[in-house]
Image (cartoon, rainbow, N blue to C red):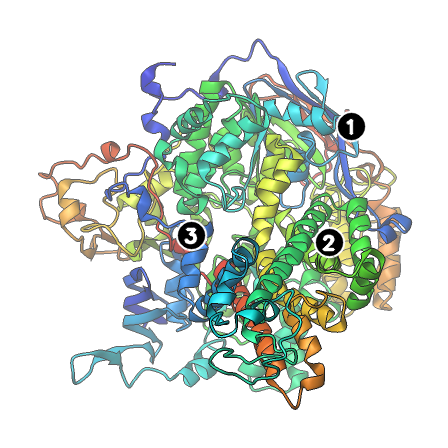
């Protein structure tokens, strides 16, 4: 074809607009991570939540590094004065410290700002290392449910028919069994430790995510761009991964954030019942559990871990709510 | 540069690119376990439709909402699996393909959708959107971006828009992105499902012109679906008219618009508001609603609304008498009037008196039933005596009529064209 | 000539958005006489719907009617006066919101919407909605209201109105639902009906039925109509007079025959030329270049000059005056185009709209009202 026909003058798409063609970067895309973040920035409660989650995650990360690589350097330096009592250093420290008969049951001193428990262990230190477990447990269990649930829900919703029936009926069966019974049965079968607690809770919450994403997929599936992709010959796998999941993901992301908080509570509850972290591991739930007998005489045993759980869960919930607003196109306009 | 439309091109070396034979699509309602045990009646969206499209031409497909034209388009592409029939694309039957074979076949046949808003993934940049078909068919490896920018320019957009999201474009521009995506893998055949009906008039013209230029440049074949008869007239070489899942008429554009032979096409053409106050069109030519596609009328599906329904052979009525009886029969079926006494009934429907003979007796009986408020009885009697025995209810019509404009075959599915019958229609 | 039924003068409605002030309706004037069917035509984004909801005082946040006068017979629907500090405030003569509700809406001026499915509540029967509407707007008992409702349904051609009274909206076809809305609009015997694209969602044969019905009812009741549409075909079929809107302004107003056969404004001309015709084969369409600019930042001078095939240098500078260009007799034919003024159009350099039309690359702004 002749060069001059390559931009046909008559093609008329032409805009006779006198306004200059605007620069690309003047336009803010209303999708994507940065847009979502910029929406959250306008929302003070979500920002507060984000702050809590960030601080907790940072603490958890730091506690992990400190515990594994630095041999509890942080705790030894700040909560324990080696000069004062070098001989007792070990027993103050989780997870192997069992008792410190020198300072049992103190409500709070300069050396132990949040007090010590019945065995004289520093509560602040135990909370610090417990953060690690709480955050890990919340995120890992939610992650398991999120990945598997999304997959199940997206496949069920996209294909429909008997695949949908089979997957969703299975999910509903899982849903029909009382939650704690399911997790406890799971742990009774595989073993009582934190890893199985996480996996058990993760599996038990798969239906929540599967149902949520399926309902979104059912409507996204009807969008013309899905049919357009099929008409163009795009493989089913790519349609699901590139179109269906990204466009159905917003409510799932919100649910996941909320679920992290819920799962932290659940696993604390399991620890409380004796099915989570086993003593002497410092986990918040386990700390609550062992403070049962001292609830009235020594309330600080339970107040501090309770407060830690509360703050963390509230933090995740605030983020979840903020995300929901940020991702909802109806609010964004 | 004036673009010569394919309309004026000689059509000697004809090559059929697509042949559709007896294509049928019946939807089942519901897909769950219970629905498979106690099936609900099926929706007969497309029923036994056949046509051919030649390479390089535009076949317009027109019909009102619910007539099955979108389903037909999707069945042709096997986006919904046809219940029955065959679709030969370049000689290969694609109606029975599935899975990977079907997916690969899509390289040669693409589709453009009606809604410029929802046919582009809002989370993808237009560059990625245009490249997607290339990636799906492993084509143009390494030069995809370049090609995508080239295509954007071809359809009248700025190549720099490659990195923008769909919502940053206006409706007309989004439809151009759709065009670019359809062209990405250099297909032979594009199905366009109402591509301009969501656009403003002035933008419509821009997009239509672009589509014609692209057709000339790439030798594309279009199946162009629309409900707007003006748009169809402008873009098509041949036009097919659908009613309730079946094709009622198919002819060259000029022929169809100037010499319509099916009463439905005539009514459709007569109803379009013409943008000229001096040509007062006749409108509201059809009464009643389109019947349900779950249980469509037997024979000719248009017969329940047809202003030219043929009288059963057994009666000997004048045209006017038959017109009265037909109107009365339908009014009773649709319950469009109130009975306020015998005189009122007679003056409303049989001003010139009830026909004589057998037909008259039936009408009298029906009138008596109405006067005693027996609507159902009257309806059944009239339907059995006048509507059902008509050839229109007995046989499915399919005729070829004489062409007045151009030389192509003119199909009209109407019994008025069976040989030897005198038209009993109220002639215009 | 008798007093017009509805007078709209210099009506202005603006939307106060984050991005700035959108002048959706920018000083439009027109009248509706008794028994007349007046068209309001334009492309999407021209401000047609905002204009009608302004007349009904139904503009919602962030929109606001900021100026102009609307009079219905001797009642003042919208009017502004200058306050003591020079600010504009609604004048005392203006009807209160309660009066608008009780006396105008439904009773005197009724409105019919484009999408009959959205205008009817899916969980109530058609009859009960119609009855409720009649009870609210007319001083009748429940039983009477039901009778009126059934009579109205029959009037608009719904078969078996007694039985259909108890049907739900989804049990009606699109055309039948639109008939129900017309019945609702007519049921309180208003003098003026504002129809906002009432046939756009319908098929052409059904549209024909509805247009017939409107003709018939207009003959019978003498109701006036303001008919909002983008379809020049429908305008040609039913309107007596037409107002053409572009970017918040009425740019041409004429009797329907004059508008089509003695077209004055280049936009109207271009619009008519860009349409494919059902009754003749058009080899090539002449589309209007580009897209309508955003009302948030309208072009200076004549608002159409960026797309106008006849644009000249002067169009960019001079705001055209909306004036009557008809001869001494006949109905006024108003147009706003500098061609019909003596501001030096003939001597002005032609603007090269082709040159600026490099590609259709005009991006819409993020707020794109008509696209969401």
Q: Is residue A34 above or below residue B109?
A: below
Q: Is residue C71 left or right of residue B110?
A: left
Q: Decide which of A143, B49 is in the foreground and name it.
A: A143
Q: Secondary structure at mark 1?
A: strand
Which residue does the image show at 32% across and 45% down from the upper left?
A: A25
Q: Which residue is mark 1?
A: B85
Q: Where does residue C86 sit, x and y in percent of width and height?
A: 16, 79
Which residue does the image show at 46% across and 69% down from the upper left?
A: A78
Q: Which residue is mark 3?
A: A34
**Residue B360 appears in view:** no
Disc tally is 3
Q: Earlier in the sequence, mark 1 or mark 2?
A: 1
Chain of the residue that carries numbered disc 1 in the rendered image? B
Q: Nearer the viewer, mark 1 or mark 2?
A: 1
Q: Where does residue B362 sit, x and y in percent of width and height?
A: 88, 53
Q: Is residue B318 above or below residue A175?
A: above
Q: Which residue is mark 2?
A: B352
Chain of the residue that carries numbered disc 3 in the rendered image? A
Q: Decide which of B181, A154 is in the foreground and name it.
A: A154
């Amino acid at each position: 074809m002749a060069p001059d026909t390559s931009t046909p003058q008559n093609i008329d798409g032409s805009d006779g607009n006198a306004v200059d063609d605007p620069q690309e970067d003047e336009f803010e895309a209303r999708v994507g991570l940065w847009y979502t973040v910029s929406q959250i920035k306008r929302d003070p409660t979500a920002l507060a939540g984000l702050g809590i989650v960030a601080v907790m995650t940072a603490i958890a990360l730091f506690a992990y590094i400190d515990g594994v690589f630095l041999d509890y350097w942080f705790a030894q330096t700040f909560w324990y004065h080696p000069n004062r009592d070098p001989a007792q250093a070990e027993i103050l420290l989780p997870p192997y410290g069992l008792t410190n008969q020198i300072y049992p049951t103190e409500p709070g001193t300069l050396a132990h700002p949040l007090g010590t428990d019945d065995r004289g262990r520093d509560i602040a230190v135990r909370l610090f290392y417990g953060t690690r477990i709480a955050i890990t447990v919340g995120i890992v269990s939610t992650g398991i449910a999120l990945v598997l649930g999304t997959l199940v829900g997206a496949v069920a919703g996209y294909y429909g028919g008997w695949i949908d029936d089979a997957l969703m009926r299975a999910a509903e069966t899982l849903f029909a069994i009382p939650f704690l019974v399911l997790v406890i049965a799971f742990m009774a079968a595989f073993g009582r430790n934190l890893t199985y607690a996480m996996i058990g809770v993760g599996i038990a919450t798969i239906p929540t995510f599967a149902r949520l994403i399926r309902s979104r997929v059912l409507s996204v599936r009807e969008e013309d761009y899905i049919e357009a992709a099929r008409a163009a010959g795009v493989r089913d796998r790519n349609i699901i991964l590139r179109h269906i999941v990204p466009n159905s993901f917003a409510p799932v992301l919100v649910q996941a954030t909320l679920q992290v908080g819920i799962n932290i509570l659940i696993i604390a509850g399991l620890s409380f019942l004796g099915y989570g972290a086993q003593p002497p591991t410092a986990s918040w739930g386990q700390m609550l559990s062992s403070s049962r007998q001292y609830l009235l005489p020594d309330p600080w045993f339970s107040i501090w871990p309770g407060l830690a759980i509360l703050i963390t869960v509230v933090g995740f919930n605030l983020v979840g709510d903020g995300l929901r607003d940020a991702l909802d196109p109806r609010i964004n306009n | 540069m004036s673009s010569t439309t394919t309309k004026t091109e000689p059509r000697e070396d004809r090559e059929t690119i697509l042949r559709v034979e007896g294509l049928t699509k019946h939807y089942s309602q519901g897909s769950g376990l219970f629905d498979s045990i106690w099936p609900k009646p099926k929706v007969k969206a497309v029923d036994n439709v056949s046509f051919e499209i030649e390479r390089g031409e535009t076949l317009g497909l027109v019909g009102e909402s619910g007539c099955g034209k979108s389903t037909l388009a999707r069945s042709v592409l096997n986006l919904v699996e046809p219940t029955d029939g065959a679709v030969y694309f370049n000689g290969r039957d694609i109606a029975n393909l599935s899975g990977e074979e079907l997916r690969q076949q899509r390289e040669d046949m693409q589709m453009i959708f009606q809604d410029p808003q929802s046919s582009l993934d809002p989370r993808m940049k237009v560059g990625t959107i245009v490249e997607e078909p290339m990636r799906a068919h492993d084509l143009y490896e390494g030069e995809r971006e370049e090609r995508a920018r080239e295509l954007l320019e071809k359809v009248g957009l700025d190549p720099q828009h490659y990195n923008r999201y769909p919502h940053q474009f206006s409706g007309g521009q989004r439809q151009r992105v759709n065009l670019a995506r359809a062209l990405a893998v250099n297909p032979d055949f594009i199905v366009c499902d109402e591509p301009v009906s969501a656009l403003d008039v002035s933008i419509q013209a821009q997009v239509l012109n672009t589509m014609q230029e692209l057709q000339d440049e790439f030798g594309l074949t279009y199946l162009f679906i629309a409900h707007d008869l003006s748009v169809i007239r402008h873009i098509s070489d041949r036009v097919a008219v659908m009613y309730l899942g079946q094709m009622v008429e198919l002819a060259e554009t000029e022929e169809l618009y100037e010499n319509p032979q099916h009463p439905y096409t005539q009514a459709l053409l007569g109803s379009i508001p013409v943008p000229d106050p001096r040509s007062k069109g006749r409108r509201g030519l059809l009464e009643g609603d389109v019947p349900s596609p779950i249980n469509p009328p037997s024979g000719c599906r248009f017969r329940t609304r047809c202003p030219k329904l043929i009288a059963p052979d057994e009666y000997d009525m004048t045209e006017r008498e038959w017109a009265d009886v037909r109107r009365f029969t339908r009014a009773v079926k649709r319950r469009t009037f109130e009975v306020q006494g015998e005189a009122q009934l007679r003056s409303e429907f049989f001003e010139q008196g009830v026909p004589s003979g057998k037909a008259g007796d039936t009408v009298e009986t029906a009138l008596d039933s109405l006067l005693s408020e027996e609507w159902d009885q009257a309806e059944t009697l009239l339907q059995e005596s006048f509507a059902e025995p008509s050839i229109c209810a007995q046989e499915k019509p399919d005729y070829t009529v004489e062409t007045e404009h151009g030389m192509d075959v003119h199909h009209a599915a109407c019994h008025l064209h069976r040989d030897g019958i005198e038209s009993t229609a109220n002639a215009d | 000539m008798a007093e017009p039924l509805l007078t709209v003068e210099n009506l202005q409605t603006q939307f106060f958005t984050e991005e700035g002030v959108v002048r959706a309706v920018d000083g439009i004037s027109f009248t509706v006489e008794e028994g007349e069917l007046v068209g309001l035509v334009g492309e999407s984004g021209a401000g047609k719907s905002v204009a009608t909801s302004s007349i009904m005082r139904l503009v919602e946040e962030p929109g606001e009617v900021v100026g102009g006068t609307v009079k219905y017979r001797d009642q003042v629907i919208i009017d502004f006066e200058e306050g003591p500090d020079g600010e504009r405030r609604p004048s005392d003569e203006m009807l209160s919101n309660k009066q608008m509700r009780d006396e105008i809406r439904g009773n005197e001026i009724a409105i019919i919407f484009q999408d009959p499915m959205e205008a009817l509540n899916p969980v109530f029967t058609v009859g009960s909605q119609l009855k409720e509407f009649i009870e609210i707007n007319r001083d009748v008992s429940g039983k009477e209201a039901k009778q009126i409702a059934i009579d109205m349904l029959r009037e608009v051609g719904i078969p078996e109105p007694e039985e259909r009274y108890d049907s739900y909206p989804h049990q009606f076809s699109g055309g039948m639902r639109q008939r129900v809305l017309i019945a609702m609009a007519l049921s309180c015997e208003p003098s003026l009906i504002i129809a906002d694209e009432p046939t756009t969602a319908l098929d052409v044969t059904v549209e024909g039925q509805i247009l017939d019905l409107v003709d018939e009812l207009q003959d019978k009741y003498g109701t006036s109509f303001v008919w909002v549409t983008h379809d020049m075909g429908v305008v040609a079929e039913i309107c007596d007079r037409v107002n053409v809107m572009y970017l918040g302004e009425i740019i041409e107003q004429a009797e329907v025959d004059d508008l089509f056969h003695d077209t004055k404004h280049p936009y109207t001309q271009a619009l008519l030329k860009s349409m494919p015709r059902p009754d003749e084969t058009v080899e090539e369409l002449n589309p209007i270049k580009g897209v309508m600019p955003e009302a948030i930042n309208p072009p200076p001078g004549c608002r159409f000059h960026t797309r106008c095939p006849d644009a000249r240098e002067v169009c960019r500078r001079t705001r055209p005056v909306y004036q009557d260009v008809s001869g001494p007799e006949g109905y006024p034919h108003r147009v706003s185009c500098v061609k019909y003024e003596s501001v030096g159009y003939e001597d002005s350099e032609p603007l090269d709209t082709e040159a600026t039309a490099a590609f259709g690359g005009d991006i819409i702004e993020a707020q794109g009202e008509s696209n969401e």
